[in-house]
Amino acid sequence: MPAPLEYLAVSCILFGIGIAGVLTRRNLLVILMSIELMLNSANLAFLTFSRLHGQLHGQVIAIFVMTVAAAEAAIGLAIVVALFRQTGSVRIDEATRLRG
């Protein structure tokens, strides 16, 4: 069984990949997937610390994070569909033209 530090290292790597995706990509779908990757890496860290300390608090927080991630995915996809209907593209640059 891997040590907790290995799980935390994987969590940090996944979080870094997610941040890189948010900062470098222009496609809204890729940005949403990067945010999901960041939330999943936070879940992995919560579960690692929960297991390390023998508490259930990290598992409860992970369930709440999954709930927020599901809501974020539903609302984000609705925004993507609305943006695509208006502009014909899902690039972030096109979204700035939608301002009031």
Image (spheres, helix red, strand yellow):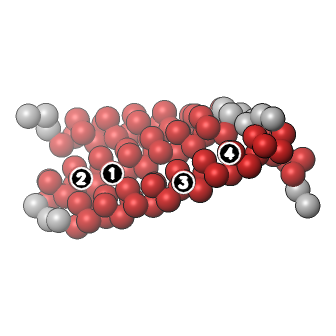
Q: Mark 1 and mark 3: span between their CA atoms?
A: 19 Å
The residue pinned by badge 2 equals 47
Quick one: label 2 or label 4, which is nearer the N terminus?
2
Q: Residues within 10 Å of mark 2 (few under 14, many from 20)?
A: many
Q: Residue furthest front?
A: 85
Q: Mark 2 and mark 4: span between their CA atoms?
A: 31 Å
Q: Residues within 10 Å of mark 3 (few under 14, many from 20)?
A: few
Which amino acid type is shown beneath numbered disc 4?
Val
From the viewer's perspective, is the residue at label 2 or at label 3 nearer? 3
The residue pinned by badge 1 equals 43
Q: Are marks 1 and 2 in contact (CB under 8 Å)?
A: yes
The residue drawn where x is 78% and y is 43% is 85
In depth, the one of 81 and 95 nearer the eye is 81
Rendering coords of residue 11 (x, y %): 34, 40
Rendering coords of residue 57 (x, y %): 22, 67
Q: Is residue 89 left or right of residue 3?
A: right
The residue pinned by badge 4 equals 80
The residue pinned by badge 3 equals 74
From the viewer's perspective, is the residue at label 1 or at label 3 nearer? 3
Q: Is residue 20 left or right of residue 46?
A: right
The residue drawn where x is 88% and y is 56% is 99
Which amino acid type is shown beneath numbered disc 1?
Asn
Quick one: label 1 or label 4, which is nearer the N terminus?
1
Rendering coords of residue 31 (x, y %): 60, 40
Quick one: label 2 or label 3, which is nearer the N terminus?
2
From the viewer's perspective, is the residue at label 2 or at label 4 nearer? 4
